[in-house]
Image (spheres, grey):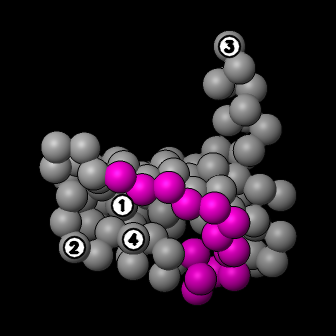
Amino acid sequence: MRAIITVVGKDKVGIIAAISSLLAQNNVNILDISQTIMQGFFTMIMLVDLQDCKLKFSELKDLLIKKGQEIGVDVNMQHEDLFNSINRI
């Protein structure tokens, strides 16, 4: 299963490291990543493969949200199919 992770917040050091480390610790492979800074705001979108992740989707999503709160950014994760359906409308 693949998922889309979005991260948005005020830019600061360590955002990519915090999110990617959490993913690595849970055997989540990053397939593609795009990141930009828009007038001081950090935005990142990742396509990830959850095939080898031992956690349930909801457990990983909760960990990402908690990590986002710790570092001051909003993190969201959606199934790839849901993301595609929402963005087709």
Residue under label 4, please give it: 16
Between marks 2 and 1, how big is the CA–CA gap? 13 Å
Start-end of magenta stretch: 23-36
Task: For mark 1, give the secondary structure.
Answer: helix
Q: CA distance from mark 1 to mark 4?
A: 11 Å
Upstream in the sequence, badge 1 or badge 3? 1
In space, the residues marked 3 and 2 are separated at their CA atoms by 35 Å
* Mark in front: 1 vs 3: 3
The answer to whether any part of residue 37 appears in the image is yes
The quadrant of the picture occupied by the C terminus is top right
Q: Is residue 74 visible?
A: no
The kind of residue on which mark 2 rests is Val
Residue in the foreground of this view, choosing between 34 and 23: 34
Q: Which residue is mark 2?
A: 13
Q: Going by the image, does 59 lie left or right of 73?
A: right
Distance between the alpha carbons at the discs numbered 1 and 3: 28 Å
Q: In the rendered structure, which disc, 4 or 3, sits on the residue that comes first in sequence?
A: 4
Point out the tag, 2 or 1, that comes first from the N-terminus.
Answer: 2
Residue tagged 1: 68
Task: Tell me the number on the disc at residue 89.
Answer: 3
Judging from the image, what secondary structure is the residue with disc 4 in? helix
Give the residue displayed 72% in from the left and 46% down from the top: 79
Is residue 7 part of the magenta span, yes or no? no
